[in-house]
Image: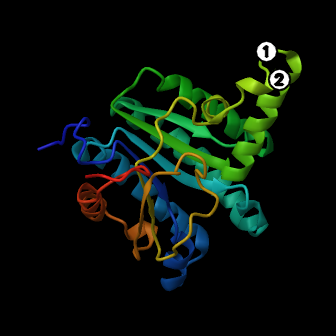
Amino acid sequence: MPKDANDKTGPNHVAIIMDGNGRWATQRGRPRLFGHHAGARRVREIVRACPDEGVKYLTIFAFSTENWKRTQTEVAGLMALFRRYIEREAKALFDEGVRVRFIGDRMKLDDKLVSLMDNLELYTSGNDKVHLTIALNYGGRDEVTRAAQRLAFEVEKGTLTHKDVDAETLSKFLDTHVLPDPDLVIRTSGEARISNFLLWQSAYAEYEFVDTLWPDFSAAEFASVLSNYGGRERRFGAVLA
């Protein structure tokens, strides 16, 4: 039976660092891009699992600001994969009630990809079953820097004063300003670091580091991780009696 998205024992917003595509492919004697394609198929499964698990918001880390350091072949292949994913999945995402948003700096992305991103956001803007946010050319420090620049510009214009600048105000200039903060951040592949992902937003998130490589991270394992979250006591800095 599907869980109620308002059930407070489970996370409303789950963020995932999808790690391990390259290693998964290497273990099979295949090029790294083979793993990225397998990882894209896994995204489809996890998105579809969200309603049954009561997850309203899902944010996935697709490409970081640091990933440009990879080989030109891998970067070009990833950009082609992103374009293909949007073109092939758009209708299915729409039909399944998924609203898609992209976060990150679009300035370095090619015009065709940005156009596809814009169109998918518009196409799915009326959906509300699952809110899928894709972090593409995203870095947490870069996001906060860009937000601070926009905030400084408003101060320069006189729209705001320095006394207006607080955490709540800065949050309104982040890429994620329309989203709730994540309750749970999952990282696959056995690595125990956050890799510059949602640094501001995850201040009070729970973290789960799993050994499974992303292409093998099934809906069943997703459900198991969410079940573990339900048993945690979240204090947000307070001492509970």
Which class describes the residues within 10 Å of circle 2: few (<14), some (14-19), or many (20+)? some
Element type at marker 1?
A: loop
Residue at 40%, 30% (x, y): give it.
94
Q: Position of residue 118 (x, y in %)?
A: 63, 29
- Is residue 65 toward the left or the right of residue 168 in the image? right
Residue 79 seen in render: yes
Element type at marker 2?
A: helix
Considering depth in this image, is 64 or 114 the residue closer to the camera?
64
Residue 139 seen in render: no
Specify the quadrant of the image occupied by residue 161: top right
Q: Which mark is residue 155?
A: 2
Considering depth in this image, is 82 or 10 the residue closer to the camera?
10
Which class describes the residues within 10 Å of circle 1: few (<14), some (14-19), or many (20+)? few
Q: Is residue 52 above or below residue 18?
A: above
Q: Which residue is the extreme one toward the left?
A: 1
Residue at 34%, 42% (x, y): give it.
12
Residue type beneath disc 2: Val
Query: Label 2 vs label 1: CA separation?
Result: 6 Å
- Is residue 146 toward the left or the right of residue 215 in the image? right
Residue at 39%, 74% (x, y): give it.
212
Q: Position of residue 68 (x, y in %)?
A: 76, 60
Residue occupied by mark 1: 159
